[in-house]
């Protein structure tokens, strides 16, 4: 296993987030920050929460509310916002989006506070609900069409499969995109205003190593056979060819990063073979059926070993990062795929990163 990934080149790690609103890095916004929390998952949309003290010495008014007047109305609905995290000498942009909600907190015993909520550009896809029929064709062309409707550029890898006409029935564009991409074992994420899509097997946004009792502060890892299977099968009918379809998962499944023995191997030894039949989906032909059963098996297999941890704040830990965990025992030391991340900053605990990750393998 490789050594732990360094967080900064200098001996002191200064990791207070840098916030830019409407193109401005305002001193008062920076100074009055109480906490930051950025959440993202493999479902594709990132959400930001910022808490500020909402009182300050304001020129011409003395001690007053900080952000409620037109002379400092940066923290307003609809304003673009960006956040950088990590070492202040070389910060990394971790969020770009738009302020969508404001919440005032006031009590007689403390300073007033303002909570600012923001979402990335996929917020529009979450709010846009449609009923429409998408014509048959290549999957990547269909995805590009939906992205274009949302005004998003697209960076897509793979996803060239031919699909039948797809019905989007009273469904948001984001839910429709997620459903299509998940069906073909892919992931989507946003970089600025570019929607990125790739097969899960090709995705590796970063590679990070964490060691217990060093940057890795807390970890919980579970290897669970409850949802593991030996194979996934499908049966249907090819209308064009006029013949039955029968498919079973095969060696083309994607287990993701890591090494060791799979859940299916442990399952077969402990309980014998178990099969999962896909009964809630349809396939047009043998090729699509094979892709569906392989995706179904892969998604189960990769959840065999699941980790939840807290690490020293690291902006390189994102959804899609290959995360190597050290010092957690020989069975659980492995490389995991990050599926959910929260970047936290507050005045008491500083910068921390909470993550969830999965791996298809357990050490012997």
Image (cartoon, rainbow, N blue to C red):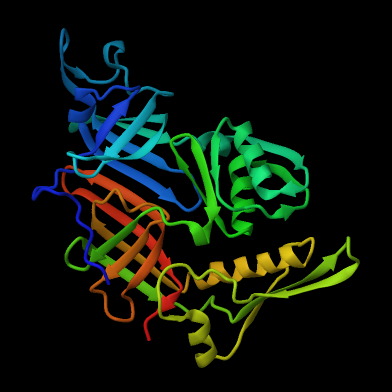
Image quadrant containing the C terminus: bottom left
Location of residue 92 (image quadrant): top left
**As displayed, is residue 216 above or below residue 264?**
above
Q: Position of residue 342 (x, y in %)?
A: 34, 50
In this view, which residue lies farthest toward the left? 11
Q: Residue at position x 73%, y 74% from top?
A: 247
Q: Nearer the viewer, residue 210 or 48?
A: 210
- For residue 343, side relative to residue 7 (left or right): right
In this view, which residue lies farthest toward the top? 60
Location of residue 141 (image quadrant): top right
Q: Position of residue 115 (x, y in %)?
A: 32, 33
Location of residue 105 (image quadrant): top left
- For residue 24, side relative to residue 248 (left or right): left
Q: Position of residue 144 (x, y in %)?
A: 63, 40
Q: Nearer the viewer, residue 37 or 237?
A: 237
Residue 218 at least partly seen: yes
Q: Residue at position x 19%, y 17% from top?
A: 64
Q: Position of residue 40 (x, y in %)?
A: 41, 48
């Amino acid at each position: 296993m490789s050594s732990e990934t360094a967080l900064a080149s200098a001996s002191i790690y200064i990791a207070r987030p840098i916030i830019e609103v409407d193109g401005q890095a305002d001193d008062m916004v920076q100074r009055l920050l109480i906490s930051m929390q950025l959440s993202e998952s493999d479902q594709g949309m990132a959400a930001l929460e910022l808490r500020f003290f909402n009182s300050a010495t304001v020129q011409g008014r003395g001690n007053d509310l900080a952000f409620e007047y037109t002379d400092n109305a940066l923290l307003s609905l609809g304003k673009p916002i960006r956040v950088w995290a990590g070492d202040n000498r070389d910060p990394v942009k971790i969020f770009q989006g738009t302020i969508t909600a404001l919440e005032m907190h006031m009590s007689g015993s403390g300073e007033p506070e303002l909570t600012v909520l923001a979402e990335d550009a996929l917020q529009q896809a979450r709010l846009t609900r449609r009923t429409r029929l998408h014509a048959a064709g290549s999957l990547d062309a269909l995805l590009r069409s939906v992205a274009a409707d949302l005004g998003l550029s697209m960076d897509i890898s793979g996803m060239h499969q031919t699909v039948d006409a797809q019905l989007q029935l009273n469904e948001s564009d984001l839910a429709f995109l997620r459903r299509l991409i998940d069906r073909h074992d892919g992931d989507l994420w946003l970089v600025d205003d570019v929607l990125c899509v790739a097969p899960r097997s090709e995705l590796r946004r970063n590679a990070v190593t964490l060691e217990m009792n060093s940057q890795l502060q807390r970890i919980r890892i579970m290897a669970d056979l409850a949802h593991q299977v030996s194979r996934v099968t499908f049966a249907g009918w090819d209308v064009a060819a006029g013949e039955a379809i029968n498919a079973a998962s095969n060696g083309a499944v994607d287990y993701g990063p890591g090494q060791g023995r799979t859940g299916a191997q442990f399952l077969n030894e402990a309980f014998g073979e178990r099969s999962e039949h896909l009964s809630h989906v349809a396939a047009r032909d043998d090729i699509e059926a094979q892709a569906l059963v392989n995706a179904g098996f892969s998604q189960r297999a990769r959840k065999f070993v699941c980790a939840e941890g807290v690490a020293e704040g690291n902006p390189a830990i994102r959804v899609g990062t290959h995360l190597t965990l050290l010092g957690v025992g020989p069975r659980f030391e492995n490389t995991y795929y990050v599926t959910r991340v929260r970047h936290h900053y507050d005045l008491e605990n500083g910068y921390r990163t909470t993550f969830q990750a999965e791996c298809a393998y357990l050490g012997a």
